[in-house]
Amino acid sequence: MSAAREEILARIRSALQDVPAGERAGDVTVAREYRTSDDRGADELVELLCERLIDYHAQVRQVAAGEVGRAVAEACRELGLARVVVPPELAADWRPGAGEGPEVVEDRGLSAAELDAIDGAVTGCAAAIAETGTLVLDGQGPSGRRAITLVPDHHICVVSEDQVLGLVPEAIAGTASSVRERGLPVTLISGPSASSDIELERLEGVHGPRHLLVLIAR
Amino acid sequence: MTDAARHPTFPQAARAALADTQLRHNLGHATHTIRAKRAEVVAEVPDWEQLREAGRALKERVLRHIDDYLLELEGAVQAAGGVVHWARDARECNQIVGDIVAAHGANEVVKSKSLTTEETKLNEALDRRGIRAWETDLAQLIIQLGDDTPSHILVPAIHKNRAQIRELFLSKLDDVPSDLSDDPHELAEIARRHLRKLFLNTPVGISGVNFAIAETGTVSVVESEGNGRMCTTLPEVLISVMGIEKIVPTWQDLEVYMQLLPRSSTAERMNPYSSLWTGVTEGDGPREFHLVLIDNGRTDVLADEIGRQALNCIRCSACLNVCPVYERTGGHAYGSTYPGPIGAILTPLLSGLEEAGSLPYASSLCGACYEVCPVKINIPQVLVHLRHKEVKHSTAAGGLRGRLAGEHLAMRAMARVFADRRLYEAAQRSGRLAQWPLVRGGKIERLPGPLSGWSSMRDLPPLPRQSFRDWWRQRT
Amino acid sequence: MTGGAPRRASLFITCFNDTMFPQTGQAVVRLLERLGVEVDFPLEQTCCGQMHFNTGYADETVALVHRFVRAFADSEVVVSPSASCVGMVRDYYPRVAEVSGDPGLAREVETIRPRVLELTELLIDRLGSDDVGAFFPHRVTYHPTCHSLRMLHVGDRPLRLLRAVRGLELVELPEATQCCGFGGTFAVKNADTSIAMLSDKIRTILDTGAEVCASADNSCLMHIGGALSRQRAGVRTMHIAEILAQTEGSP
């Protein structure tokens, strides 16, 4: 294996004879003239996020910050979810209250088979990107482990207003320390699962949750 | 035996493909639809050209220093608990992957789509070791069940229609109701049920890699269906195979490619799922992560200063979708893992002109591909460059290339004529004389020999009695 | 593209126009003289080498590049009725100079490149007007060639010129930006695919109901016109220069 490594590196060096010996990677100019920040106001961003999420067939509701728990419970009732999984660090007032709806199971390392028997996941997120209608989960806190937003058929994701960013570069910047310092897994979710593999007709829900509901807490 | 002896040249393969009306119909519809959607979704982005330029420049930076970046990536992946393997060629890659699978006593793996593993023919190699690799991408599953090969980078089963897919599922999968219709939604449901069992129970997953961040050791899979997430999250052991060129320098640089790729490929603002993981995370995802770095000819591409830009490719397939040749011939006519405009340059560079010498000519040089390439690969420039290499190559091979020798002689003779005014004017005059047996009723309807390809569908006007320069001389 | 109207322009006719479509060159001369531009024709010109270069015979193109830069060495402005040939000179001559390894040739190429203009570029950018005083009372559709569109980026210059022609009914060509399938030697080396592409281009042209299909490149027109002729379609092709050269007095 290390023979392969040395040989590949040697081939590379011989292939790059036109690159001057003193040149460093940073010497290759990269013009960054694209947008990296967004000055749209919160209301505009929330509106845009809703529009974009709906465009890709997620469901969206705006709720008052204090009403999230109730909205989650209501949604679970509407969707017929009897058991939902939540990250242990999901805020108490974002969970459906006891007796109000589904059985709430905290994720303390549920297996894939156990998750398969669960109807939906309720999570928060690290950020949302308005321009693309994207949720950013970072594998910690309210985002939860990756498997819980993958195996159950429903995902209810709560986004608080101040988490809504305008552009992709902003979200990448926002997750940088989680990745650099803690090596956390980041998942970008934009709508429920889809495929265009049969005659290019867009099909929803092949694998992964077939239903995504986003609650925006204001 | 090289592939050249096994598969036809592009013109030969194209002739057969052009007559396949089902393919023409499916592909024409598909490419025109996606083409329009892409244009629409790109038009929304006010800084698209700036993103393209950054996408190109970042790749230039990576390629010029790829050895340093690979070492940085290796260090970062290892620090995050992953294992890095290096493979010089397809055989070595397949060996490494097979060994890891066998070491875990597994005889089944779930696979998310990876063109690189198509390139190395990994599934066949695993099969020979008694390991069944289940393709989980819907189109790849369709291809696998039909013992077929992909014809498009993004929608590999585009050449199949719903009725054909229904037939496949009925004959090759278990527990399929006999009254299954050909409604795509029902077909997708069958695939979902079949694959879900596998996802939840298979201990080893194999994936490709869209981008690998050197700075952090982060590896990513960008997808729509969720099977990528399934393969990279649920199994205990994950093996990801990546071509060495897939490197992006820093985490922040993802901001460019995560905008360029979705809009260029599926024509969406963002694709449904992108997974970005770094090594192993305790309690979340696989316990063991292996990254296989593969060369398999990429260092040859790197060595070609003009061809090197082909390694910018982020496999979006935008070029396929706008190519007037690809839309009519489909991917199989290119006889390689990578079809379309990118295939026409990458395949000869990876595999050599002996195998793929006809591919650089499979283009009218219309330039539509370059216009849409998110990382600004100047495909027409590389095509012409490869044609130059092909001419030199086949000239050096001398008498072995009998067919091409005629063209060499004719082109060299014409160049000599054009290089000398008197010879040129003499040729004009003798052309006018020589054509008279071919002119009927003021038209030339039949041309001899290799030029008959022209006259099979086109008339030619006869050479006029007076050339422009004759007229000019007369008036002055 | 700097500078105002040139007093004089050297015509770069191109080998196939010289030999097969002299009427296009005659039209360019008539048109430019009418607009007050004196035209000269350096007889030493032959071929820009595009066919050779694009087919992979880069080494053979070197002599042709030498010939071109010498032939037009004294020209302030070089004008050509062929976008593809202008594209060859402006975009690819530097590469041929590189192949030749001759720094002198590279310098000569750099000097000549900015002086070479495609006809519609000269008319719109340097002579400054859409209206060249033409009269052509026919239904016309315009096919934008790939080189003019994607290499030279001539944009809507040809359409602006055609719109200003008195009596001319301009019909938009559907899917106009689709390649016609000529591609030089592609039409012969990949004849089947070329014909498939051409079939769709012919169909869209016939759908417009136009009597004339115009373009800024006779190479594409030879290919398109060849099929229209074979099909006895009753539609003819004309280079845009020939339309613009027509006035009320002289059809």
Image (cartoon, rainbow, N blue to C red):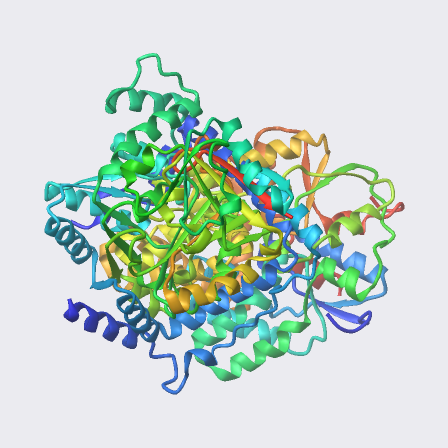
Q: Give the residue displayed 38% in from the left and 70% down from the top.
A: B215
Judge whether residue A58 can be spotted in this image: no
Q: Position of residue B51 (x, y in %)?
A: 56, 62
Please say if C76 is above or below A44: below
Indicate left or right for A40 with A194 as reference: right
Q: Nearer the viewer, residue B288 or B322?
A: B288
Image quarter hosting the N terminus of chain A: bottom left
Please say if B7 is above or below B219: above
Q: Position of residue B176 (x, y in %)?
A: 29, 19
- State the count of labels: 0
Please say if C161 is above or below B61: above
Q: Residue furthest bottom?
A: A22
Judge whether residue A138 can be spotted in this image: yes
Q: Residue furthest top?
A: B179
Q: Position of residue A60 (x, y in %)?
A: 59, 38
Indicate left or right for A75 with C86 as reference: left
Q: Give the residue displayed 20% in from the left and 56% down from the top.
A: B93
Q: Residue furthest front?
A: A99
- Res. B70 image quadrant: bottom left
Q: Position of residue B435 (x, y in %)?
A: 51, 45
Q: Nearer the viewer, residue C164 or B179?
A: B179
